[in-house]
Image (cartoon, rainbow, N blue to C red):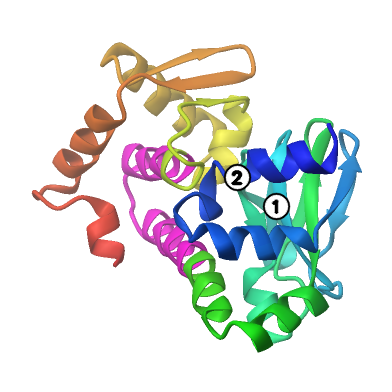
Amino acid sequence: MDVTHARRRIRETGWLRNLPGPFCTALLAGSHLRRVGNGEVLFHRDDPAPDFLGLVDGLLYVYADSGDEGPRLVFVAHPGWWAGSVAMVGGSGRRCTVVARAPSVLLSVPRMHIEALARRDPATWRHVAVNVAAQYDSLALLLLAQANPDPRVRLLISLQRLHRFNDGATIFPVTQSELAELSGLSRNSANRAMRQFVAEGLIETGYGWLRIVDPKALDAALCQRNGSGECCERRAG
């Protein structure tokens, strides 16, 4: 894949898909390709953040520092996901650790290019803030899941996060252990909940993969188990 093809693909998914075409063109004009192998660390928490990284092809695992227990898996990112908006706006280091779980192709947009673009077009920071808001919404759902004592609700929220913040994806190459880690559950608790959801026709599972059969039915199941007509993302907002 060359850089022209990569730029065309990434503006069709995720954050850039709903932004003005001239902004996307100007942003990506300063990008260059970065290729990483399976298992390669893109960056660690607190590393310098010289660029904004967009996933064109492949799969990334996002880890957060959980104190004495060490890094914990908090998200699985599909193409269209971008890393670095919070650090870019705040001028800070990286907020998480990101590892490739498949050979991956990314576009790197240097901080200096974004700052130069913002000097010409003040709307640049507003567009970047759209990505920051998505990161906040994802974090809010993660915290909402951790606060709920019901393993089934935790798992449903985790599945909703994967779907919602991966541009509506429904198939995820994750193991049951990884999904348990995402949900803050023991493997046994996660397995019991997953068997129930399979029986209810909400998900399908296989060796190392999971598919959300009907996202709307998943949302309805979450609202029902929350005991109200409100879906959890509405509460998070």
Badge 2 or badge 1: first in the primary sequence: 1
Report the residue marked by disc 1. Answer: 54
Q: In the image shown, does 206 or 122 lie closer to the viewer?
A: 122
91 vs 151, left or right, is right
Judging depth in this view, the residue of 36 and 30 nearest the camera is: 30
Question: Which residue occupies 30% across, 12% down?
Answer: 199
Q: Which segment is the magenta one? A: 133-162
Q: Amino acid at mark 1?
A: Gly
The secondary element bearing badge 2 is classed as loop
Main SS, magenta residues: helix
Q: Is residue 230 left or right of residue 19?
A: left
From the top left corner, tell me how far across and down residue 137 is, in percent: 42, 63
* Amino acid type at image mark 2: Gly
Q: Is residue 207 magenta?
A: no
Whether the magenta-drawn stretch holds residue 140 is answered as: yes
**Residue at coordinates 75% horizontally, 82% vertically from top-left?**
116
Give the label on residue 80, or none.
2
Looking at the image, which residue is at 71% across and 46% down?
Answer: 7
Residue 79: image location, x then y, percent: 63, 39
- In the displayed structure image, the side of residue 199 where residue 111 appears, left or right: right
- Rounded to the nearest angstrom, the CA distance separating label 2 from label 1 is 6 Å
Q: Are marks 2 and 1 in contact (CB under 8 Å)?
A: yes
- Picture quarter with the C terminus: bottom left
Density class for disc 1 (Cα within 10 Å; few <14, some 14-19, many ≥20) is many
Q: Position of residue 92 (x, y in %)?
A: 74, 83
From the top left corner, tell me how far across and down residue 16 is, in percent. 55, 54
Residue 231 vertical position relative to residue 219 in the rendered view, above or below: below
Instruction: Work out whether 151 lies above or below 120.
Output: above
Whether residue 65 is visible to the viewer of this picture, yes or no, is no
